[in-house]
Image: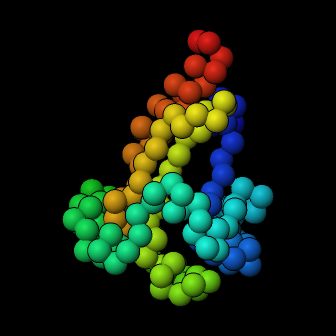
């Protein structure tokens, strides 16, 4: 992505301390300067990202995403799971995420809202959006 002129930024629910802990748990560790935290979930709300028990636990997208990824990959991801308590308790724990590709002029080139747990943007679509936005910016 950086070769195409894009920077990665990750926004998470939590505190600066929790963000540092999270970044250090990844393999390889995430550089802390790429991570921003939103303790009140204001950006999540502004972007219309889904929130709630029904979205987290009772949405058909959750079992479909787990099935698509395979139970073994979910088990592997959960194997080293470490709970980092969110600042506002379980209310933050039921926040779904998303992914945006923001073009060089600030335009949204791609938007994805996780419908449920484990329902993430298809990487092929993300890469295509980055390439398309880069081509538009450079006139190619």
**Residue at (56, 27) in percent of width and height:** 133
Q: Position of residue 124 (x, y in %)?
A: 42, 38
Which residue is the extreme one toward the right?
Answer: 33
Q: Indicate the quadrant containing the C terminus: top left, top right, bottom left or bottom right.
A: top right
**Residue at (59, 65) in percent of width and height:** 42
Say which quarter of the image contains residue 35.
bottom right
Residue 4 seen in this snapshot? yes
77 above or below 98? below
**Residue at (62, 12) in percent of width and height:** 139
Q: Position of residue 54 (x, y in %)?
A: 29, 74
- Judged left or right of residue 1, residue 81 is left
**Residue at (51, 54) in percent of width and height:** 47
Say which quarter of the image contains residue 5.
top right
Q: Position of residue 32 (x, y in %)?
A: 75, 63
Residue 118 seen in this snapshot? no
Say which quarter of the image contains residue 123.
top left
- Judged left or right of residue 65, residue 126 is right
- Judged left or right of residue 93, residue 21 is right
Q: Indicate the quadrant containing the N terminus: top left, top right, bottom left or bottom right.
A: top right
33 above or below 2? below
118 above or below 107? below
Of 133 and 20, nearer the camera is 133
Q: How many marks?
A: 0
Q: Position of residue 49 (x, y in %)?
A: 45, 60
67 above or below 111? below
């Amino acid at each position: 992505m950086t070769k195409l002129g894009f920077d990665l930024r990750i926004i998470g629910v939590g505190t600066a301390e929790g963000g540092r802990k999270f970044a250090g748990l990844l393999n390889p560790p995430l550089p802390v300067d790429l991570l921003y935290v939103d303790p009140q979930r204001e950006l999540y709300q502004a972007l219309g990202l889904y929130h709630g028990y029904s979205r987290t636990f009772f949405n058909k997208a959750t079992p479909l995403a787990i099935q698509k990824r395979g139970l073994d990959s979910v088990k592997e991801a959960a194997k080293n799971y470490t709970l980092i308590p969110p600042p506002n308790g379980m209310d933050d724990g039921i926040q779904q995420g998303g992914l945006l590709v923001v073009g060089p002029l600030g335009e949204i080139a791609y938007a994805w809202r996780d419908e449920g747990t484990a329902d993430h943007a298809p990487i092929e679509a993300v890469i295509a959006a980055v390439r398309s936005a880069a081509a538009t910016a450079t006139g190619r």
